[in-house]
């Protein structure tokens, strides 16, 4: 069976990456692409690397144009998806790459986003631990999927095994992330200009203000079975001069009496059979260069007994595993297709 697809926000980074991956999907026909200010223009003018899709023209983003497809992807700024999802009742599968349907707590939405709160959808991180299982089981047959925030899923995948196994204390997590500016979208912003980024590193959303914090707490609470209020995290992202990528360094205290073998076994047991989340050998740590273009999260684990903390270093491509790849992997599961279809573990080098 071939599934018809519409992609909104197709002139942006996330929309373009969704299209790049779907272009090689044998079960998908990309029928419609939409945008706002760029409507009426050829897609190729805004995504010149997508040569196989040069026949497509950007249409207006309206519920009428998006409806009538088997799968609809929404790659819109936060707070803008809800106005369309409310009107897409007839769409068999809708996947939102924005934040509108990620959070289960209305108070958390009000604190970090504001505006109208929309119902939470099935979270699109298949490898995430949820109780005694994985999120992929909940994704099977799902009709509404919330793709993750790239920083949030990176940190959650980094720490969920330790939290679920009870070998680290989730009340004192510290995460610092080196992040490429493509995660902020394609719209022009002074702090994202090349002249402002090159040769420097810029912290942002410092002091517990980043919008992905409640998403991380929600995911780790689901892994541990605890209340989200028990998850405390100091989260600091830093913009660095690379177009893509996240390198997340997260630490948490070791629970008293836990051995080194138990710590490493928690991550090995969680990800030893996974295709797209891989634990590196002891003493090895990933680089963002190793995951560019891949739907892969590479994890390095260190046990710092002097500080009595575990350190987890995780690298992802924020536009693939962090966004578009997670969305398509979740789509494959929901539709009953092979989970890895159109997705690669191989990065691009040099």
Image (cartoon, grey):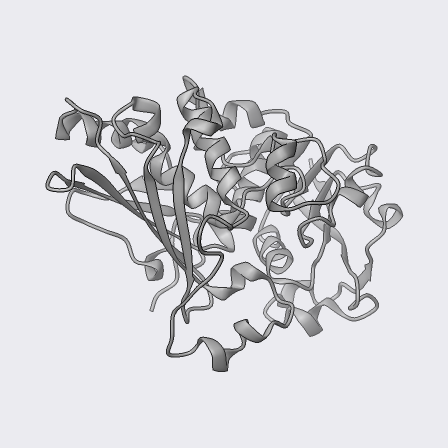
Where residue 221 sits in the image (x, y, percent)?
45, 27
Q: Is residue 1 left or right of residue 200?
A: right
- Is any atom of residue 328 visible in this view? yes
Q: Residue furthest top?
A: 132
What residue appears at the point 26 percent right and 27 percent down from the top-left corner? 266
Q: Is residue 126 above or below residue 8?
A: above
State the quadrant of the N terminus. top right
Where residue 80 sits in the image (x, y, percent)?
74, 50
Where residue 23 sits in the image (x, y, percent)?
62, 54
Where residue 249 sits in the image (x, y, percent)?
31, 50
Q: Nearer the viewer, residue 89 or 346?
A: 89
Q: Nearer the viewer, residue 275 or 255?
A: 255
What residue appears at the point 35 percent right and 53 percent down from the top-left corner? 176
Q: Residue furthest bottom?
A: 195
What residue appears at the point 26 percent right and 31 percent down from the top-left corner? 268
Q: Nearer the viewer, residue 1 or 86?
A: 86
Q: Is residue 111 above or below residue 13?
A: above
Q: Residue furthest right?
A: 64
Q: Is residue 108 above or below residue 240?
A: above
**Res 193 quadrant in image:** bottom right
Q: Is residue 288 above or below residue 4?
A: below
Q: Is residue 264 left or right of residue 5?
A: left
State the quadrant of the C terminus. bottom left
**Res 72 quadrant in image:** top right
- Is any atom of residue 273 visible in this view? no
């Amino acid at each position: 069976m071939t599934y018809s697809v519409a992609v909104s926000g197709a002139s942006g980074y996330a929309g373009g990456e969704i299209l790049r991956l779907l272009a090689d999907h044998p079960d998908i026909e990309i029928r419609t692409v939409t945008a706002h200010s760029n409507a009426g223009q050829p897609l190729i003018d805004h995504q010149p690397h997508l040569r196989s899709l040069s026949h497509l023209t950007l249409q207006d983003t309206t519920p009428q144009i998006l409806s009538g497809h088997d799968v609809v992807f929404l790659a819109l700024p936060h707070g803008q998806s809800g106005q369309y999802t409310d009107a897409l009742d007839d769409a068999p599968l809708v996947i939102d790459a924005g934040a509108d349907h990620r959070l289960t707590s209305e108070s958390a939405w009000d604190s970090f986003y504001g505006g109208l709160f929309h119902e939470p959808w099935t979270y699109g991180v298949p490898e995430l631990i949820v109780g005694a299982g994985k999120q992929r089981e909940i994704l099977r047959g799902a009709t509404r999927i919330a793709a993750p925030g790239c920083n949030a899923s990176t940190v959650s995948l980094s720490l969920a095994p330790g939290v679920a196994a009870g070998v680290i204390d989730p009340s004192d997590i510290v995460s610092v992330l080196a992040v490429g500016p493509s995660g902020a979208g394609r719209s022009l912003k002074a702090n994202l200009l090349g002249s402002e980024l090159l040769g420097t590193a810029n912290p942002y959303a410092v002091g517990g203000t980043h919008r992905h914090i409640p998403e991380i707490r929600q995911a780790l609470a689901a892994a541990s079975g605890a209340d989200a209020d028990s998850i405390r995290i100091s989260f600091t992202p830093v913009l660095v001069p690379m177009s893509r990528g996240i390198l997340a360094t997260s630490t948490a205290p070791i629970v008293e009496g836990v051995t080194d073998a138990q710590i490493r076994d928690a991550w090995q047991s969680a990800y030893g059979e996974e295709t797209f989340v891989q634990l590196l050998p002891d003493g090895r740590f990933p680089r963002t260069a190793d995951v560019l273009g891949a739907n892969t999260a590479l994890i390095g684990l260190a046990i710092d007994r002097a500080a009595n903390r575990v350190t987890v270093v995780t690298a992802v491509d924020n536009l693939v595993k962090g966004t578009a790849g997670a969305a398509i992997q979740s789509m494959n599961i929901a539709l009953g297709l092979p989970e890895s279809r159109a997705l690669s573990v191989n990065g691009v080098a040099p």
